[in-house]
Amino acid sequence: MHLVKKIEIIANSFELGKILDSLDKSGVHGHAVIRNVAGKGLREGSEDLDTTMLDNVYIIAFCMPEHVKTVAENVRPLLNKFGGTCYISDVMEIRSIKCVASL
């Protein structure tokens, strides 16, 4: 087992390509995307996300701890400009270190 960082991003699906590109440039090459995410408080000023014209996506990815600063530096400007949120937390990977890059 070893420590990795879990990156969770909730954002507008319109910006999905830009966000995935920024993760890739940060050294995070594997991810999963869940589409049509709705909930309260995901976006400032919107109480009913079910009626929005653009759907939200949930992106989950994992990286080595040394990539976290680069991820934050690359993702933050996109989220500040287009909206969305990102959470980064510590988790334990139980597979071999070679499998961390792929999801």
Image (tube, rainbow, N blue to C red):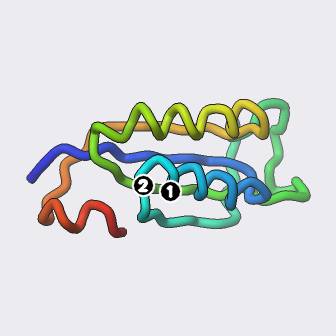
Q: Residue at x 29, y 37 (%)?
A: 66
Badge 2 marks a residue whose secondary structure is loop
Residue 84 placement, left or right of 72: right
Q: Residue at x 84, y 58 (%)?
A: 54
Residue 93, horizontal then vertical, whole percent = 19, 55
**The disc label shown at residue 24, or none:** 1
**The disc label shown at residue 28, or none:** 2
Q: Pick out the residue farthest to the front.
A: 25
- Determine contact: label 1, label 2, CB under 8 Å: yes
Residue 12 placement, left or right of 61: right
Residue 99 sits above or below residue 6 on the image: below
Residue closest to the eye, 35 or 1: 1
Residue closest to the eye, 26 or 4: 26
Residue 99, horizontal then vertical, whole percent = 23, 67
Q: Residue at x 65, y 66 (%)?
A: 35
The amino acid at mark 1 is Asp
Picture quadrant where residue 61 is located: bottom left
